[in-house]
Image: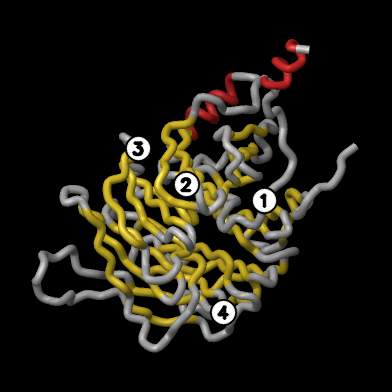
Amino acid sequence: MSASTDECNELGLNSVIGFNGTVSNGLQYTPCGNFIFYPLGSIIVLRSIPPSTPKIFFLDGQNDQKVSCIAVSKSGKYLASGHETSDAVKAEAIVWDLRRAIKNCDDGSSPSAGGCLVHRLHQHVGQVRSVDFSCDTAYLTTIGGQDDNDLVVWDLSTGVGICGSRAGNDAVQSVKWLRRRNDRFVTCGNYHFRVWQVCTETPKVHPVDANMGSMRRVMSCVDLAHDDKFAYVGTKTGEVLRFRIDRDDIKPFNSSPDEKRPSLETYNKERFSKGVRSLKCIVNPSTGNTNVLVGAGDGTVQILNPNLKPIQTHKAKLDGAVTSLSLHPSNKAMAFSAGTDLSQRYFIDISTFTPQLRGTCHFGEIYDVT
């Protein structure tokens, strides 16, 4: 009887089937372009991409907290996952050594990338809503859920929080570091858009709210142009907003008012049905202009030109709300993957814009197996 008990206690996860498409930006490529990763319950699944040898492995934090957000560093060194739990318990943010995880699974027979957990970060209560890495992989920003709504900047070399603040007067939905600066990031949420600057010497974070005029929108997702001049934000009412994100550096107390302030520049006139759920900036290789790839709540995927007008030849309809868009890291590929809240995974070549279904599974409870 004791032997059987010991065997049960040592049972480990060997394989997984499924994809949780309800997590915003949950389906992403690794920077090397050889794997995709996505959340499934409390674990993160990494799957190789054809024509590579079929491989699947996972990152398991050994907790019962469901993954609520994920992000990968620009260098491909780290992967971070935010989790959610009951309101009375602190939710974890976990930082993984992605390179070591891939190497361990390439060298061994186990599908579990054990020994790759770098930091467990505890600060937020109930949920970690959004995470993102700085461009140099030195810092990680985490945002708490609606009941927490705190913002913390972490030093990845030590796993210690450098500074933090209330993320806003209302709920914050998403955070994104600038592509070329390691001291600034942006956040968007309910009725506000902010550009933050980090001072590691003080240490403190300083936000500047964007001037939006009379417009009030609930903003759910954000991405930045490759030159860091503009931020593109998706709203729950179907608009794509373009913000100019220039701002002054942090000034001493009682100094003159800010001369530069982020501001709303323009937005699209043709709304997307059921809101904008995901978006990505794409550089047109022939012109160098920034286009915007948009995923909508009604399953529409479409590209907007630099004037935020829809390109009708680059439009497709998927099954379910498009919660994830991930561009292939190779500039030559000109393709992307899309995930929906009905647990569908698609691959789309931008030249043809014809969706290819790459994976599907149950999107609700599973009551029985045989």
Q: N-terminal of the two: label 1 or label 3?
A: 1
Amino acid carrying label 3: it is Gly
Q: Residues within 10 Å of mark 4 (few under 14, many from 20)?
A: some
Where is residue 248? Give x, y as percent.
Answer: 20, 68
Cα gap from disc 4 to disc 3, whole angstroms? 38 Å
Task: Report the front residue among 199 and 335.
Answer: 199
Comes first in the chain, label 3 or label 2 = 2
Q: Position of residue 146 (x, y in %)?
A: 48, 63
Asked if the residue at tag 3 contacts the one at tag 1, i.e. Cβ–Cβ closer than 8 Å, the answer is no
Q: What's the amino acid at mark 2?
A: Lys
Query: Is 2 above or below relative to 34?
Result: above
The mark closer to the camera, 2 or 1, is 2
**CA–CA distance between discs 3 and 2?**
16 Å
Q: Which residue is mark 3?
A: 159
Residue that carries the numbered disc 2 in the rendered image? 90
> What residue did someone put label 4 on?
237
In the image: residue 157, left or right of residue 8: left
Mark 4 residue element = loop
